[in-house]
Image: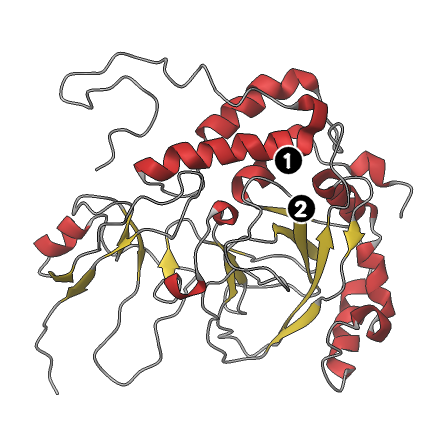
Amino acid sequence: MNTVSRSLRAPVVGFAIHEPVHSDPPQIEVDAEMPYETVHSAVLDGWRVVSFPAQRVDGDPEVVGVFGYEFILEQMVEIDA
Amino acid sequence: MHRNYRSQLLNDDEVASFIINGYHIVHPEFQTGFNETICDNLRLMPENPGEHIVEALPAIEVVLEHPAVVGALTSLLGLNYARDPGGHIHMNPPRTRAQPWHQDERFGRGHQDRDIDHVKHLMLMYYPQDVTEDMGPTVLLPGSQRRVAAPETMVTLVNLRGQVFSILEAGSVLLTHSDIWHAGTGNRSDRVRYMIKFPFSRTEENGKPSWDHDIESIPEIRMRLDSEHPSTLSRNEYETDHSLRVRTWNNIAGSAAMPLRSEAHLGGPWPESGGSTTASRRRRDLP
């Protein structure tokens, strides 16, 4: 998930879901909706944060940079094989 | 250049929308059957002609010379804009996957060399057939032309808040800032989706607006540049992005430039109990 700041409560501005199976990479979809509004909401729904975004060093104040801060989350779900 | 383009110049509101979002859609009226003829010619091409599009498809000049197209290009790039070498016919066949998000590269320029506060280069994209949502429409991230990001930082991005798709009628012309983030999406239909792309450039700075400007509209335009945000921004980005939007206006407006600093954003209602501790209209209440 990509958020506008390093806060768990920051709005989510991007996401990609990678299923742990052989499959095509996730696609940009016309009807995609953000699965959660914040990382905190995802945690409440059973996701674990496995990687937090690094603190960025101060960059050029004249520049707007990459899109969001990247959190990586995982969720273990039992499925019928 | 078509002599009737002056009646089809953009107005202040349309130019402000382009500055904020990074794209503008033109709907030229072509003769009945024109778009179908272009599609038929594309299907008969034995191979992609590369950048020799006009030589391979002379009828495309009708699009490039249409007064609505000339009017929009003149408005955004100035009176003496030029078509650059290059261009490409995109053919998106059935059952393709989406491209990754990217900014187009320009020969001899690094990823950091972007026009974040100016309109110097545009891409024209002409769609000769209806583009439905399952035909792999082009996706854009409005406002992203002001972002400077290395390509490798985009590779993990997939679905983004605010992304928009070029779901358009046949004959539509999409003009984009050359640095806008975009991608072709996967074609899930059983039809081929064509798009013909041409690059254009500004050749000189404007001494005055090259569009249908009305000085009376400046306060309203300033309000839009101050307050409209096509994507969710961080605190740091908010101030920078706002400044870049006003600077872009000033760089293309010549004598119709406006003060960089706005006096309006510090006003507004007093804070309410239980809310943010600031009365500023800036987004200081974001986490």
Residue B59, compared with residue B95, is above or below; it is above
Q: Residues within 10 Å of mark 1 (few under 14, many from 20)?
A: many
| Quadrant placement of the C terminus of chain A | bottom left
- Asked whether, in this view, residue B130 is left or right of residue B4, the answer is left
User: Label 2, on which residue?
Assistant: B120
| Quadrant placement of the N terminus of chain A | bottom left
Question: Quadrant location of residue B191?
Answer: bottom right
| Percent position of residue B245, x then y | 52, 34
Q: Nearer the viewer, residue B234 or B34?
A: B234
Which of the two discs, 2 and 1, labels the residue nearer the N terminus? 1
| Percent position of residue A37, x then y | 23, 48
User: Label 1, on which residue?
Assistant: B15
| Percent position of residue B142, x then y | 49, 47
Q: Residues within 10 Å of mark 2 (few under 14, many from 20)?
A: many
Label annotation for residue B37:
none
Q: Nearer the viewer, residue B50 or B65?
A: B50
- For image coordinates 71% across by 66% down, the residue present is B87
Question: Quadrant location of residue A32?
Answer: bottom left
Question: Quadrant location of residue B37?
Answer: bottom right
| Residue occupying the far right of the picture | B3
Q: Secondary structure at mark 2?
A: loop
Residue A37, compared with residue B101, is above or below; it is above
